[in-house]
Image: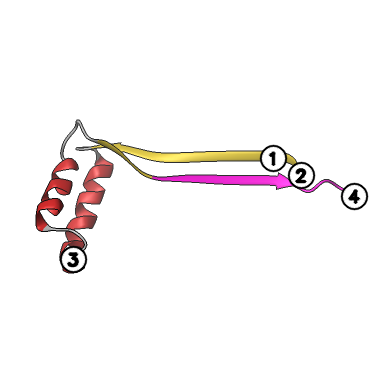
Amino acid sequence: MTEIDVHGETIMFQGGSAYARYWTLTFEELREQILASGLITRALWKETMALFDNPSFWTWQNSFVATSARKPAT
């Protein structure tokens, strides 16, 4: 392979940011389904939601990596 290229992105955000607001709205919309799953408690739910408003809180969403290359001419 030749002309190999790799590009990565990690989405980091701070509590109180527009991205945190997006996640707040998303989780609020799904609240009942998430709590009904039994995987988290209401107390944990409240703690998590408070972090989205806390400017001292930083977290990351996902990391994406894309690669590309060319096969050499034969």
Marks 1 and 4 sit apart, C-alpha to C-alpha, by 17 Å
> Alpha-carbon neighbours of circle 1 within 10 Å: few (<14), some, or many (≥20)?
few
Q: Secondary structure at mark 4?
A: loop
Q: Earlier in the sequence, mark 1 or mark 4?
A: 1
Q: Secondary structure at mark 1?
A: strand
Q: What residue does disc 4 label?
A: 74
Q: Residue at x 9, y 53 (%)?
A: 43
Indicate the position of residue 21 as horizontal and vertical percent values.
21, 46
Indicate the position of residue 57 as horizontal and vertical percent values.
22, 35
The mark found on residue 38 in the picture is 3
Per the picture, the main secondary structure of the magenta-coloured stretch is strand
Indicate the position of residue 1 as horizontal and vertical percent values.
76, 44
Asked if residue 65 is among those painted magenta in the image, a careful observer would answer yes
Q: Which residues are magenta?
A: 62-74
Three-letter code, disc 3: Gly
Q: Secondary structure at mark 3?
A: loop
The mark found on residue 1 in the picture is 2
Q: Residue at x 48, y 46 (%)?
A: 64
